[in-house]
């Protein structure tokens, strides 16, 4: 399919002048994601006209050391360094003690000076790139130091996941944030929502008249959402051991993907209307049938294997992991949405580390034809229609349908209609963190979590987590899979017909 026309032209509103203050600026997220994203935005002219970044962390570092560390981080991403010097002129650093009000007051004074130097009028993004255990302390201390007050410009708090580790702790975190910040100031990042092809799910569903009439239980048999990674736990064992795949991927990204596929159309493409619909969807999730938990849930952990022809260790042998760990690195879950549109349609959500391939794919499996007039002639079942939304790394949409096999003999074959983002002329995609940061600067909360959604998803998952983590036969319930495979074979046996042991089939 070739694009007919770009409609309308690709324009981006430029955000108001502001400072971006990154707490935890000595850490991994800052170097790997945040600063490279800000650099790309800057190089493409998408940052505000007047803007600067102030890194803050406990580590003592000079401004030059910070600039140098960030230059290496950006360079290692293979980005064109042509705009580096101008960007580096906007990079500053201040050491802080996270739980000391005086330290934040000193930071506030420094920010006032930097505002004056860079011609920024007081608007600030405050990004928490620190370990989640520090979020509460940090939010409260920021408020006590007056850094949340919007007297001179807006103040926006950007919070990374995880938003708590269960319903109660997410509420506690929200109460701490609420001491200084109101909901319109809080931007809870879900970087999956900011992926271009994830945003496209709404465009695809609601900007075309031909798909939405089919988008319901009358035509759809089942939906599969798969997020596979080849990466293992990397350097994050401390966090992952506590989280496991359900907290790491399901409570956030998988739930948002489900919501985008299944939510009702909002009346307007506006942050709160869209978030209202996602929230309504979370409210319609059927509570997990705990008495038959393992008919609906498969948990597994990777064993040693091979990725891209190279041997990789078992999860339990990764640095920092307990050798008898029961943390799941793979989960497959059957979920139902109890509403008029989706009654009886299973949604299979699957995510795992160390799988064969990195991919995020949504497959809409349509129902069989009501009556096959070809069955007698062909003596075979007719393949059902499938719509595949490839989110990453391929960014594609493919519709599979049946057509006549060429030749004299009567026969059918599956053919496809295919669209690829790569083929779009003039395509200028934004990476997820670029989009999230620019939206935070623009004050657009559409692609961020609202607290009601966070709580509903925890309310859905908490009983599941509790049942899995408390049960006596927890060790027996944890399946194994070879690193580099598509997951445990037991999962495939449980739901025959569902291709999550090889989502490419
Ligand atoms: N890294 C990633 O890919 C992703 C991270 N996130 C989230 O982003 C946040 C930051 O992640 P990441 O950068 O990996 O975190 P890091 O572990 O790299 O920590 C960031 C900084 O926080 C400070 N810090 C670390 N431990 C402590 C401690 N115990 N007490 C006080 N300060 C500490 C350190 O700075 P200093 O010692 O100088 O103060 C460190 O440089 C986390 O909430 C994470 O869940 C979300 C998605 C992806
Ligand atoms: O949030 C997370 O996402 C990454 C996967 O993100 P992707 O953009 O590379 O698909 C995952 O590796 C990590 O464990 C999780 O915390």
Image (cartoon, grey):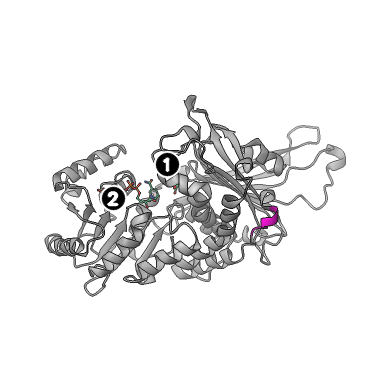
Image quadrant for the C terminus?
Answer: top right
**Residue assigned mark 2:** 44
* Residue at 61% in and 65% down: 284
* Residue at 61% in and 54% down: 467
| Highlighted magenta segment, given as a residue range | 288-292
In this figure, what is the number of numbered marks?
2
**53 with respect to 327 (left or right):** left
The location of residue 491, given as percent across then percent down, is: 66, 41
Let me know if residue 66 is in the magenta part: no
The location of residue 100, given as percent across then percent down, is: 22, 61
Of the numbered discs 2 and 1, the one sitting upstream in the chain is 2
Mark 2: few, some, or many residues within 10 Å (few <14, many ≥20)?
Answer: few
* Residue at 57% in and 61% down: 460
Residue 184: numbered disc? none
The location of residue 61, given as percent across then percent down, is: 17, 46
**Residue assigned mark 1:** 237
The prevailing secondary structure element of the residues shown in magenta is helix
Please state which of the two labelled residues, at mark 2 or mark 1, is closer to the viewer: 1
Image quadrant for the N terminus?
Answer: top right
**7 with respect to 117 (left or right):** right
The location of residue 432, given as percent across then percent down, is: 40, 51
**Mark 1 CB within 8 Å of ligand 1:** no
From the viewer's perspective, is residue 203 above or below residue 297? Answer: below
* 502 or 160, nearer to the observer: 160
């Amino acid at each position: 399919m070739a694009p007919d026309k770009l409609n309308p032209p690709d324009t981006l509103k430029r955000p108001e002048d502001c400072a971006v203050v990154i707490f935890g600026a000595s850490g991994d997220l800052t170097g790997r994601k945040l600063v490279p994203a800000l650099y790309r935005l800057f190089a493409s002219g998408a940052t505000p006209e007047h803007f600067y970044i102030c890194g803050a962390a406990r580590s003592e570092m000079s401004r030059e050391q910070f600039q140098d560390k960030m230059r290496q981080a950006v360079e290692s991403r293979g980005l064109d360094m042509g705009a580096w010097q101008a960007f580096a002129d906007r990079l500053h650093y201040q050491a802080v003690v996270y739980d000391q009000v005086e330290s934040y007051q000193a930071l506030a004074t420094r920010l006032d000076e930097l505002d004056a130097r860079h011609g920024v009028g007081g608007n600030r993004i405050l990004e928490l790139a620190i370990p989640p255990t520090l979020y509460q302390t940090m939010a409260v201390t920021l408020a006590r130091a007056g850094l949340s007050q919007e007297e001179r410009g807006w103040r926006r708090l950007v919070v990374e996941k995880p938003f708590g580790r269960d319903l109660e702790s997410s509420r506690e975190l929200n109460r701490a944030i609420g001491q200084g910040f109101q909901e319109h100031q809080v931007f809870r990042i879900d970087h999956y929502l900011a992926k271009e092809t994830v945003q496209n799910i709404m465009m695809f569903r609601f900007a075309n008249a031909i798909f939405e009439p089919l988008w319901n239980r009358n035509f759809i048999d089942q939906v599969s959402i798969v997020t596979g990674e080849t990466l293992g736990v990397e350097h994050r064992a401390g966090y992952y051991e506590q989280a496991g795949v359900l907290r790491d991927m399901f409570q956030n990204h998988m739930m948002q993907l489900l919501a985008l596929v299944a939510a009702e159309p909002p009346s307007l493409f506006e942050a709160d209307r869209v978030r209202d619909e996602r929230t309504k969807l979370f409210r319609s999730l059927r509570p997990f049938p705990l008495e038959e938990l393992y008919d609906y849930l498969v948990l597994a952990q990777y064993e040693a294997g091979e990725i891209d022809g190279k041997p990789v260790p078992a999860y339990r042998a990764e640095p920092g992991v307990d050798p008898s760990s029961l943390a799941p690195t793979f989960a497959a879950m059957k979920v139902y949405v109890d509403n008029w549109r989706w009654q009886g349609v299973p949604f299979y959500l699957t995510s795992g580390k160390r799988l064969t391939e990195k991919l995020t794919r949504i497959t809409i499996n349509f129902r069989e034809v009501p009556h096959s007039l070809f069955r007698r002639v062909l003596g075979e079942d007719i393949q059902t229609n499938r719509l595949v939304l490839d989110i990453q790394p391929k960014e594609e949409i493919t519709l599979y349908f049946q057509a006549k096999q060429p030749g004299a003999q009567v026969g059918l074959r599956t053919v496809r209609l295919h669209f690829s983002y790569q083929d779009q002329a003039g395509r200028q995609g934004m990476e997820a963190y670029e989009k999230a940061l620019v939206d935070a600067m623009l004050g657009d909360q559409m692609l961020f979590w609202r607290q009601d959604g966070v709580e509903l998803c925890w309310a859905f998952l908490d009983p599941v987590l509790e049942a899995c983590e408390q049960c006596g036969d927890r060790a027996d319930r944890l399946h194994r899979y070879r690193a580099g495979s598509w997951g445990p074979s037991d999962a495939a046996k449980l739901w025959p017909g569902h291709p999550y042991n090889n989502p490419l089939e």
